[in-house]
Every structure is written in structure tokens, then in C-alpha cells.
Amino acid sequence: MRGLVIKNTGSWYTVKTDDGRTIESKIKGNFRLKGIRSTNPISVGDYVQIIINQEGTAFISEIEDRKNYIIRKSSNLSKQSHIIAANLDQAFLIVTINYPETSTTFIDRFLAGAEAYRVPVVLVFNKHDLLNEDERRYQEAVIKLYESIGYKCVTVQATAENDSEESIEKLRPLLAGKVTLMSGNSGVGKSTIINKLLPNVNLRTAEISDTHNTGMHTTTFSEMLELPEGGYVIDTPGIKGFGTFDIDKEELTSYFREIFKFSESCRFNNCTHTHEPGCAVRKALEEHYIAESRYNSYLSMLEDKDENKYREAF
Ligand SMILES: Nc1nc2c(ncn2[C@@H]2O[C@H](COP(=O)(O)OP(=O)(O)OP(=O)(O)O)[C@@H](O)[C@H]2O)c(=O)[nH]1
Ligand SMILES: [Mg+2]
Ligand SMILES: [Zn+2]
């Protein structure tokens, strides 16, 4: 029987079968997937074959090839990774300028990772209501930057009434018929947005900490929820950092769209854009065609690669 993994808590996987049943399943034997050392061999979004047993639970016996997946390193020192979700059509990165603050480094690392795995990203700026004048102006500048690079940006206010300009209703047409990963720092409002989109769903949400201005890691496992318009949204635990796991140094340039565009004019085709003569990227940076924040994010990822380390928080 074929099914879709819609939830994973510990060793149990909830599988939605093609004939519409949901069956709690476990992995049979040892799954070793080529090239990925992962703490969870199967993730939300995977299509699997299951064998149902007498208790009404099942064993997962096979996993279908993935179209793509998003991964992060599971901890600071470990070489293992954790697959956040598989077979995505797109990811929404929920960003808050404040409460909590999402750094541009964090945004850039997420975008680069998504480029590497070929997952299109929409940047969703939430909590518009909490921003003061300065923060609103800053948000506009950030949006302008990412739009100029070619990323779609939307501003919302998950707690707003439906007819407001920042209504989450405008996300609906972007989600219809697609599998969308909701990602972002803890406390940015991922679960709140999904609760608004799906009134029959009541995901746990929690206030952010007053003292630290950070979320409480309220969501602890990924879950796929079906949309009335067709498609799914995937709620995920808040992420702090996004490991550069699996990312090739030689290819890093191509994960920063605008840097890649200028790099085609660099004198050396293996230019790292750090010290080489005739570097078109550094020239574009000086002339403000490339934002300093983007270049710094590129450098931070390049450095990680050199030291083979993972930065936990930004
Ligand atoms: N003022 C305001 N508060 C919001 C908005 N969106 C979400 N919140 C609040 O922000 C807090 C955190 O929201 P959650 O939905 O739990 O955040 P999350 O991203 O799911 O967090 P994790 O599950 O920890 O990753 C809650 O108290 C929400 O009510 C918004 O647009 N405006
Ligand atoms: Mg949550
Ligand atoms: Zn260069």
C-alpha cells in the first residue's frame, strides 16, 4: 500500500494512504539512503510503501525517490543531518523584522540552501502590526533588496482580521495545489499563520520571550496539513541556523543569484571573490550593485566551508 508521510514523532510515522486512511507506521529494518547520513531516514513529505499488520499499524518497507528535500545539521558537532521535509514545491520563509529579529544572514543562508536543493522560496514578512516607523522603513528596504534579486515578498499580519491589507488570505492563491514548507526562526508565527489558513486545525502557539525576544520552540515536530484548495502546508519547528551541509564550495556562488550573475565577468572562473584580481563581484559590491549584507552572508558560508564548522545562531 502506498502512502504519504504526514507526521513524524520519534519512531512513529503517520502515513496517509492513497485510499485516504491514516495509519501509524514504523520503519522496518535499517534504511540507508545513498549519500545522506541522517538522523531521520524518512521524513514528512516522503512517499512510502507500507505493510499493514493485524494491530492496524504498519511497517514502512520502501521509500520512493525524492524530488528534493530540505536538510539541516542535527547539532553543532555532529556530522549527521536532519531532513526537515521532502518533495516540496516551494518554501515560505516566515521573517519578522522584530519580535523576534530575523537577521539577513539567516535569510541568505536559507535562500542559498533552498537554491542548492532547487526549492523556490517566497519571503513572508509577518507581524507588521508590531513594527514602529523605523522598523517599517527597514522592512521596506529589505523587501526591495530581495525583490531586486528576484524573490517574491509578501507582508502579512497573522493576527489581523481578514479584510486588512496584511491579511493572510493573500497567501491562499500562492499555496493552492502545492506542497509548501513553512520555515523560519522560532516565534515568527508559522503555526499561527497555518491556524488562520485552516480553521479546523489548532496547532499550539506561544508568546515569545520578553527577556530574550526569541520564540519558545513551541512546535517540536514537522506536520503536513491538507489545504481545502488542494495541496499541503508543512508546519516545522523553528530553526536557529541553517547548516551548509552538502553545499559545494565551488557551487556556492551560484546559490547567490546576483553574485552569480556578476561572477561570470570575473577574470578567473574559479574566483572565490575574496582576493583575486579582476574580480567582477567585488567591483559590483563597491559600486553597490551587490548589497553588503548579501556579500557578507556569502563570505560567512564560504568560511564555514573552510573550517568545516556549523554556526548555530545568527
Ligand atoms: N502581534 C502579532 N503577533 C503575532 C503575529 N503572528 C503571530 N503572532 C504571535 O507570535 C507568537 C508566536 O507564534 P507561533 O505561531 O507560535 O510561532 P512559530 O513560528 O510557530 O514558533 P515555533 O513553533 O516555536 O517555531 C504567538 O504568541 C502569536 O500569537 C502577528 O502578525 N502579530
Ligand atoms: Mg510553531
Ligand atoms: Zn570574483
Image (spheres, grey):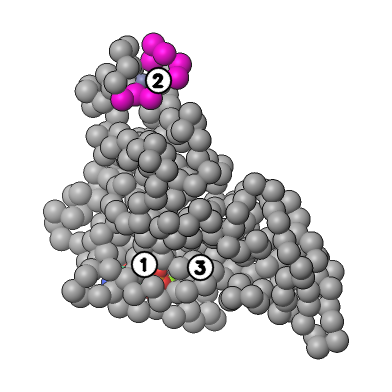
Secondary structure under the numbered disc 3 in the rendered image: strand
Occupied quadrant, residue 162: bottom left
Residue beneath label 3, please?
A: 235
Return the residue at label 2: 271
Q: Quadrant of ligand 1?
A: bottom left
Instruction: Tell me the kind of residue under disc 3.
Output: Asp
Circle 2 SS class: loop
Chief secondary structure of the magenta portion:
loop
Looking at marks 1 and 3 on the same chain, the residue that comes earlier in the sequence is marked by 1
Image coordinates of residue 246 in percent, x first then y, are: 53, 43
Label placed on residue 186: 1
Residue at the image point whose x is 78% and y is 77% from the top? 58
Question: Is the N terminus in the top left, top right, bottom left or bottom right quadrant?
Answer: bottom right
Mark 1 or 3: the one toward you: 1
Q: Is mark 3 within 8 Å of ligand 2?
A: yes
Instruction: Looking at the image, tell me whether mark 2 or mark 3 is earlier in sequence order.
Output: 3
Residue 11 % position (x, y): 64, 75
In the picture, residue 101 is in which quadrant?
Answer: bottom left
Look at the image and give the residue range highlighted in magenta: 265-274
Q: Mark 1: is the Cβ under 8 angstroms from ligand 1? A: yes
**Dot placed on the residue nearer the N-terminal end, 2 or 1:** 1
Eye-nearest disc, 2 or 1: 2
149 lies above or below 110? above
Q: Is residue 272 magenta?
A: yes
Mark pair 1, 3: CA separation: 12 Å
The residue lying toward the viewer, choosing from 299 and 149, is 299
